[in-house]
Image (cartoon, rainbow, N blue to C red):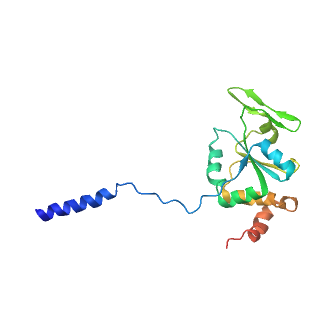
Amino acid sequence: MKTLFTVVIVILSLGLGAFLPTETPKPATTPQEIHWLSISEAHARNLKAPRKFLIDVYTDWCGWCKVMDKNTFRDARVAAYVNQHYYAVKLDAEQREPIKLGDQKFEFVPQGQKGYHQLAASLLNGQMSYPTTVFLDEQLKMIQPLPGYMDANVFHQVITFIGDGHYKKQQFEKYKAETYPKLFAKK
């Protein structure tokens, strides 16, 4: 009986140890994140040091926008490249605050229960679709709006195609099939 009692105490002691709080190991490094700016901040920086713009046009209710935030924009390769080559801007297509860029003022336009921001409508050429990633050159001229979700691998191909100026020399399909693998071969 004494042996059975000792065995039960040992088992209970070991079992209770599993429920004690333990310190969760922390990752060695935190993932790199994109340094998002407002459009006004990016515009001011661009006047001093010109760069292309990457504008994420989103809404609070857009599910695919959230997936892109969680998966694509948090990818280390994507974040590192964007931070080095672009001014990254988050633009809520339904924000109510006016935005002034140079001499132009963009405002919220009420429509039904919600509405839209004039700057978002301008960047999306009136095609209000979310998420849409808009690329502008250093002079704020439209390069391309790209509607829809893109995973990190496809997005990395797109941002390098535009960021390094390949869009001026070749079609994206050729870049993706021939140039990209040479530049970014996995080692």
Q: Nearer the viewer, residue 80 or 62?
A: 80
> 70 above or below 161?
above
Q: Position of residue 81 (x, y in %)?
A: 73, 59
Tell me the quarter of the picture where residue 99 sits: top right
Task: Check the image and name the residue furthest to the bottom.
Answer: 187
| Picture layout, residue 36 above or below residue 187 | above
At a point 20% along the width and 60% down the height, the residue shown is 8
Residue 112, quarter of the rendered image: top right
Q: Is residue 160 above or below residue 113?
A: below
Residue 158: tell me if it is visible. Answer: no
Residue ID at (71%, 71%) = 185
- Report x, y in % for residue 34: 69, 53
Q: Residue at x 75, y 43 (%)?
A: 38
In the rendered view, tell whether residue 124 sits above or below residue 164: above
Residue at image position (66%, 45%) is 65
Q: Is residue 55 visible?
A: yes
Horizontal side, residue 169 vs residue 130: left or right: right
Front residue of 36/150: it is 36
> Where is the N terminus found, in terms of image quarters?
bottom left
* Residue 168 horizontal/vertical position (percent): 87, 59
Q: How many marks?
A: 0
Q: Residue furthest left?
A: 1
Q: Residue 138: x percent and y percent?
A: 86, 51
Please state, as top left, top right, bottom left or bottom right, where the C terminus lies in the image. Answer: bottom right
On the picture, is 78 further left or further right than 5?
Answer: right
